[in-house]
Image: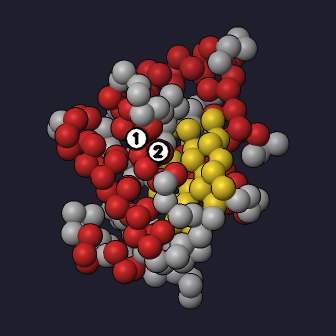
């Protein structure tokens, strides 16, 4: 957690952790569902190695702790085109992460491959221009399944998907995520 979530509930315990110090938090990863959406950009991380630590290493360590502590459901945000053998770095590490979490013992694993995400107050030029381009293409009927998705809508989709209580692994591509709102 980077900032206060602003939510209070008797069943909610908010913890600030240092992902690099797994011994300090492994035993705290408990509950029924783990929602995992941690990630960074290459620019923010500074290198591919540093980005892999966050996008792969921290997420996998958190999922491993959850599985070891009996968490039944993992909802994981990945990326479109994720594949362990992808030529491009980002989809490859996301594919490797998907493969690694599928080997863990979760009753329900839902992997989300969302379209471009709309983040409030984004300062990422490629994201801003990509959103504008996709919205323009969407207005003429192209790439409708890749309509940009607000992060709060993705969170709502994740909740809806895990409430369906399927067993096993489901990989939800962009169009399937959008169908959760039909």
78 to the left or right of 50: right
Residue lying at 41% horizontally and 25% vertically, measured from the top left: 86
Residue lying at 36% horizontally and 21% vertically, measured from the top left: 87
The image shows residue 40 at horizontal and vertical percentages of 32, 44
Q: Are marks 1 and 2 in contact (CB under 8 Å)?
A: yes
Q: Is residue 146 visible?
A: yes
Residue lying at 76% horizontally and 40% vertically, measured from the top left: 179
The one nearer the camera, 116 or 118, is 116
The image shows residue 62 at horizontal and vertical percentages of 38, 64
Q: Is residue 41 above or below residue 137?
A: below
Q: Is residue 49 above or below residue 157?
A: above
Compute the Cα span from label 1 to label 2.
5 Å
Q: Residues within 10 Å of mark 2 (few under 14, many from 20)?
A: some
- Judging from the image, the colouring scheme is secondary structure
Q: Residue 11's image quarter?
A: bottom right
Q: Is residue 115 above or below residue 150?
A: above
Name the residue beneath numbered marker 1.
Answer: 96
Q: Is residue 121 visible?
A: no
Name the residue beneath numbered marker 2.
Answer: 99
């Amino acid at each position: 957690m980077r900032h206060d979530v602003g939510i209070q509930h008797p069943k909610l315990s908010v913890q600030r952790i240092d992902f690099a110090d797994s011994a300090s938090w492994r035993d705290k990863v408990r509950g029924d569902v783990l929602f995992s959406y941690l990630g960074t950009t290459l620019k923010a991380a500074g290198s591919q190695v540093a980005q892999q630590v966050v996008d792969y290493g921290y997420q996998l360590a958190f999922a491993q702790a959850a599985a070891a502590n009996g968490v039944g459901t993992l909802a994981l945000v990945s990326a479109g085109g994720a594949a362990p053998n992808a030529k491009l770095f980002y989809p490859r590490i996301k594919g490797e992460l998907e493969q690694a979490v599928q080997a863990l013992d979760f009753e329900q694993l839902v992997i989300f491959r969302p379209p471009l995400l709309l983040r409030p107050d984004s300062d990422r030029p490629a994201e801003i221009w990509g959103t504008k381009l996709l919205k323009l293409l969407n207005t003429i009927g192209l790439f409708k399944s890749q309509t940009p998705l607000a992060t709060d809508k993705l969170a709502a989709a994740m909740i809806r998907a895990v409430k369906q209580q399927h067993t096993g692994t489901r990989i939800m591509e962009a169009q399937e995520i959008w169908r959760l709102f039909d």
